[in-house]
Amino acid sequence: MSTSSESKPIDVTVTSTSPLYITDANNQFGTVKVLPGGQIFVQTTGKISIANLIKSTTASKELAGQQIPGDINILGASGKAGTNGQPGAQGQNGLVGQNASCNWASGCNDGSNGTNGAVGGNGGNASNGGNGGDSPATTMYIGKVTGTFSVVGGGGDGGQGGTGGNGGKGGSGGNGGNGSSSGAYSRGGYNGGNGAAAGNGGTGANGGNGGSGNVINITYGSLDSGSQLIGHPISGLPGDGGSGGVGGTGGSAGTGGSPGGANGTPGNAGSNGTSGTAGTNAGQAPQINIQQGS
């Protein structure tokens, strides 16, 4: 549920399926009733006024104090996750060698070796996770508080770095052609082609830094018996680094032709990419000031 500025304060009921998003400057509310599971999200730097804030629940102060996210949340946006790297292309396989052909009257037509496979492509590098956003600086006035509310404020977490793309498989060597014999003429088998090396995995990207919290000032006129506002400043956490891509599999060797053709050499596997590092900084926790006043 989002609201817009109006000349007359509006009454709102907040539920678990209909949270209240305060997004416009100078919002004026009459009675805001928060049912079990309902949450309020502040997304504006404008002054906010609530005449009566009521929680319709019997939750204890301890539970309200530990609840994260809270009843009232003043948080920065989470950083975007980095984009994963593209996988490397698979190398083409080598061509099969031609067989020899011999006959006793005219001799032999030679065969050929299998050709080598092509190298697999390297996986693409990933992109870094975005930094978490800072929480909005907030000024809120509440005329009367009924119930215990947790107020959670802080910057958004940094986004996770993307994962490097996997290396492409090396192409397999082509099989060597077979030999032939007829009468006095003969040819041995031809060699198989070599398998190609695989591509290396792409580099994993770094995580984003956590966002910082701004000052949050909440003033209330009065507290009903047993009521309380409990501040919970939190720090935006750095995002994790992305994993490196996995190196591709080397191409298999081509088989030598019969008789006597040598097998090719298999290709080497690609190396795994380097993992990214976590974001370097956690955000600074906000200062949450809760005081009685007018």
Image: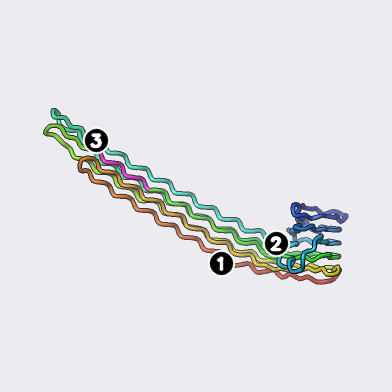
Which residues, given as a range, are shown in magenta? 170-177
Horizontal and vertical percent for residue 50?
Answer: 83, 61
Residue located at (19% from left, 35% from top): 180
Residue located at (83% from left, 61% from top): 54
- Vertical placement of 148 versus 5: above or below? below
Left or right, residue 97 beside residue 225: left
Q: Which residue is mark 1?
A: 280
Q: In the rendering, which numbered label is found on residue 52?
A: none
Residue 138 shown in magenta: no
Left or right, residue 56 beside residue 241: right
- Measure how far apart labels 2 and 1 are at the Cα level: 24 Å
Q: Residue furthest left?
A: 184
- Measure how far apart labels 2 and 3 are at the Cα level: 73 Å
Q: Which residue is mark 3?
A: 99
Q: Point out the tag, 1 or 3, that comes first from the N-terminus.
A: 3
The amino acid type, in three-letter code, at marker 2 is Pro
The amino acid type, in three-letter code, at marker 3 is Asn
Q: Secondary structure at mark 3?
A: loop
Q: Which residue is mark 2?
A: 69
